[in-house]
Amino acid sequence: MTHALELELKQMIIDTLELEDVTPEDIDPDAPLFVEGLGLDSIDALELGLALQKHYGIKLDAESDDTRQHFASLNHLAALVEARRVK
Amino acid sequence: MKASARSPQHWARIQESGTLIGMRIMVWIRRRLGRLPFRIMLGFVIVYYYCSHSLPRRASRDYLARVWPVHAGHAPRWPAWLGLRHFWAFGQSLMDKVDAWSGVTPDISLSAEDRACLDSAIRSGRGGVMLVSHIGNLEICSALSDSRDDFHVTQLMHTHNARKFNQLLDRSTLRRGPEIIEVSDITPATAIRLAERINAGGFVVIAADRIPLSEDGRTRRLDFLGATAPFPEGPFRLASLLRCPIYTLSCLRDEQGHRVEFRVFDDTTTLRRCDREAWCSDAMQRYVEWLTDQCRRYPLQWFNFFDFWHCHDRTVY
């Protein structure tokens, strides 16, 4: 994963979820984003999904994609974006 | 309040319990023998159904006792007769659906205001969410979307919901229906799909008067026809996330035919995240007011034949 993409994603998470007290450095790329770690919930997941679509044109397949896995950590998210981005 | 899908009163367990074969026979009669024989048969079926299904009968009686004073200014005078008329309206609506999807052009009318609103919503190209309820007959609206090339409708449905009926329609109708996205749970994948439809100028239909199947689905109790009833938060949260215009849509039957009502409800395009919670509360309240008004005007077209108020877990109501 490139450093630029990592930073971009961190900033996207912060902006999308309006995490006012969080800086990009606070997000550990390996730490879980949901429940523990950043403590995001299922509504945040929907919002993040929509942000991924808006920024990178990512599509997820409800049948075959394991969203939980893609959203497990920042690293997983970055892998998803690298593999599937169309913009 | 949480209602379990396993609890016998949950709507998903009770709805559409008419047997497939029976409905096929009815469709056949309607098609081959025409309207009058069909109506006579439907009369028998409705009376049979009314007498043999105590749960929907009681739910109907409970609902009518609540709505009639609002509608007519007094309690129902002939509760059993009114109940039968309520069931009849439901049977009629099922067959209107079959008609609408079989190529029989339904008699649709929109008031000038509703038509202007619909036209400008479509022309804007921004798409949107259409909040609906189980009052009236939405399949007529599908026919409306079929008749316009620029009106693309996607319907969000609980996986469990009306599967039998859709099977029936698949086999015996000629038209394509609206695109249906079946969900048991809203995932990021679903949200993305819906956002794509809306970005392309399409409209997403979401019913906001059925509580979720899953245990952790969030609901809120709101005052509705004299007592609090659980309403789902999900449709409103979704509407706030999708950042788009929101409308209300209904299709009600009156003497003249089907009356489609399409109104602007709100717009979440610029809604800030921090205002979302307050928006959801306010929007849910306004949705219930809209629903109350629909019930007041068309009391017999309410097709939630289950214990909507979930009185079984309340000591007083």
Image (spheres, coloured by chain):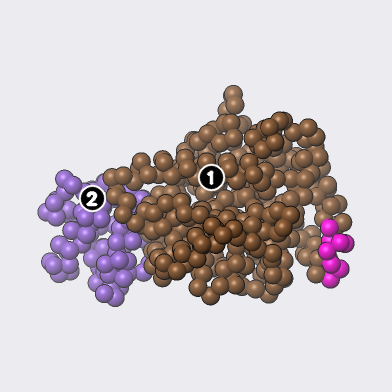
Chain colours: A purple, B brown
Residue type at mark 1: give it: Trp
Q: Nearer the viewer, residue A22 or B149?
A: B149
Q: Residue at x 57, y 50 (%)?
A: B133
Q: Position of residue A9 (x, y in %)?
A: 20, 62
Query: In the image, is B216 to the left or to the right of B227?
Result: left
Q: Residue at x 79, y 44 (%)?
A: B84
Q: Chain of mark 1?
A: B
Q: Nearer the viewer, residue B246 or B11?
A: B246
Query: In the image, is B100 to the left or to the right of B271?
Result: right
In the image, is residue B261 part of the stretch drawn in magenta? Answer: no
Query: In the image, is B2 to the left or to the right of A14?
Result: right
Answer whether residue B216 is visible to the viewer in this image: no
Query: In the image, is A63 to the left or to the right of B142?
Result: left
Asked if badge 2 and badge 1 are on a common chain, one would say no
- Which disc number belongs to residue B290? 1
Q: Are marks 2 and 1 in contact (CB under 8 Å)?
A: no
Quarter of the image holding residue B162? bottom right
Q: Residue at x 55, y 62 (%)?
A: B115
The image shows residue A24, relative to residue B154, as above or below, that is: above
The image shows residue B153, relative to residue A87, as above or below, that is: above
Q: Nearer the viewer, residue A58 or B299?
A: B299
Residue type at mark 2: give it: Glu
Residue at the disc numbered 2: A18
- Which disc number belongs to residue B205? none
Element type at mark 1:
helix
Magenta span: predominant SS is helix
Q: Nearer the viewer, residue B154 or A53?
A: B154
Element type at mark 2:
loop
Answer whether residue B233 is visible to the viewer in this image: yes
Q: Residues within 10 Å of mark 2 (few under 14, many from 20)?
A: some
Q: Chain of mark 2?
A: A
Q: Position of residue A16 (x, y in %)?
A: 25, 55
